[in-house]
Amino acid sequence: MIKVTDNVSSAAKANDHMPMKPMLYRSLLVFALIAVHADCVQAKEKPNVLFILADDMGPGDVGCYGGEIIPTPNLDRLAAAGMRFTDHYAGATVCGPSRSCLLTGQHTGRAFQRGNPGQVAKTSPHQGLRDKIGRKSDFPLRAKPEDRVTIAEIFKAAGYQTGVVGKWGLGNPGTPGDPLAVGFDEFFGLATHVDAHTYHPAKLWDNGRYVNNKGKKHLHPQYTDRAIDFIKRNKDESFFLYLAYQFPHGPYRAHDSLQEESFARKRALKGSAKVYASQVAQMDRSIGRLVQVLDELKLRSNTLVIFASDNGCGANHDVELFDSNGAFRDRKGSLYEGGMRSPMIACWPSKIAGGSTSSFVSAFWDFMPTFAELTRQKAPSQTDGVSLVPVLMGESKEPRPQSAPIYFEWSRTDRAGQAIRIGDWKLIRWLNKPKPVIELFNLAKDIGEKINVAEAHPDRVEKLLDMMEEQHRRNKHFPLPLIDQ
């Protein structure tokens, strides 16, 4: 936490050691009070931030990205009032490491957590990690308190109230990944991936207490209600709220959606497709409620609302029917674009031009330097990202610098590999074969990654492989086959 000096107290202490006429003393005191007031006004001018994260949702599910089946009027309105990103990447190809990249500003070549619990090496001491009540915990966000600053800590240092609602997946309460130990003032939701594979749990976490979910009520409306409560309680403060919805992640049982959607009946959607589509539509309505509350509290003009998804869409619904990933190849868990691309909408009516679109190539680790700049702080040296503030404000049309590449790695043995993108060029090195397999794609000409042009561009392949080596740091908990072993 940054220590703030009380100007009035400092001035008063100084006066104990020197004679001063009463009028001069009062004048200095007034100036000190004005300075404190100016600091408070300046702090309030820093925007509130509401970051809404969907789970396993493809860009093609949203109307403003071309979706034609699922109604998403509230997300479409956010895009119409803000900026829609066309080349945005999640943090990883699956949930846990993607959230880790978001919160630490590091890509999967540097982050501590680089895979879901099932990908942790058997030799890792975190395999048997337990929380304070003895429950098995997910791999933590970081190893020790002083390691890897989080975006929540950035906001706390700027005087913000911070909260997280929903799916955490970065370590249970009572472990090094406890959300209350990494910069959040409040946490309401489910801590682990396994817990978050249901919408009707018997218990959930509420600020460090493991409490009963009476009647196993559906969690989604509880998340929205808790988020609204947080906003109302902190309306007079600067706040950062990370709202991590479970929608539209499976399982896709009939009672996992909140109601029968009329559009789903009209389109004769059945089974998992009907549940998935209903969840997306219901999440969109929840987002509409949140924006309405911001309007009612007159907070909209000073609140940056961001919407994104934690990875490409999953495989447990009819992806082709909804065209969830559009032209992108493959889906969640893959190093192809379909596993990594995310919709991203940023709306801040007083600052971001409405109806704008950006093709700036961005990723989750860019939010750390972005939020640092917005709160007038220096980004920690750990970050692999670049600030999106000039892009959001329409002040820059420069492409992403080559010194901050889009980089992914994936240690799962059946699909292990690395991917790097510089400009329009993307290289994938698959590591689950006896020898590495290299694929090179020109995304400007081949967004579907159908034509491997590696043999035609050996110099470019060599350059990108060298850059891969620079981005990777060995992690004994998530070793890469053929490289770290």
Image (cartoon, helix red, strand yellow):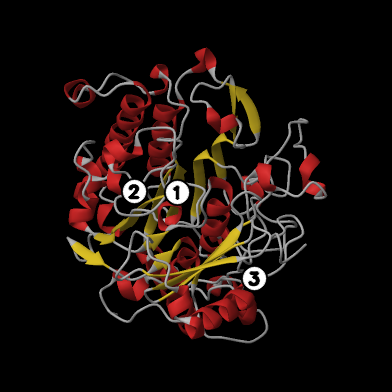
Q: Which residue is mark 3?
A: 472
Q: Quadrant of the N terminus?
A: bottom right
Q: Is residue 297 left or right of residue 430?
A: left
Residue found at the far front of this picture: 455
Q: Is residue 287 left or right of residue 365?
A: left
Q: Residue at x 60, y 68 (%)?
A: 2
Q: Where, by quadrant of the figure, is residue 456 drawn?
A: bottom left
Q: Which of 297/451 is in front?
A: 451
> Disc number at residue 241?
1
In the image, residue 116 above or below residue 387:
above
Q: Is residue 382 left or right of residue 320?
A: right
Q: Earlier in the sequence, mark 1 or mark 3?
A: 1
| Residue 468 visible to the viewer | yes
Give the residue type that dot 1 points to: Leu
Q: Secondary structure at mark 2?
A: loop
Q: Is residue 331 left or right of residue 138?
A: left
Q: Which of 67/180 is in front?
A: 67
Q: Residue at x 33, y 28 (%)?
A: 273
Q: Which of 211/105 is in front?
A: 105
Q: Earlier in the sequence, mark 3 or mark 2?
A: 2
Crowding around mark 3 (Cα neighbors within 10 Å: few <14, some 14 to 19, many 20+) is some
Q: Earlier in the sequence, mark 1 or mark 2?
A: 1
Give the residue type that dot 3 points to: His
In the image, residue 10 above or below residue 191:
below
- Residue 268 spot, x, y in % from top left: 22, 21
- Residue 401 spot, x, y in % from top left: 43, 81
Q: Where, by quadrant of the figure, is residue 68 drawn?
A: top left
The label nearer to you, 1 versus 3, is 3
Q: Which residue is mark 2?
A: 325
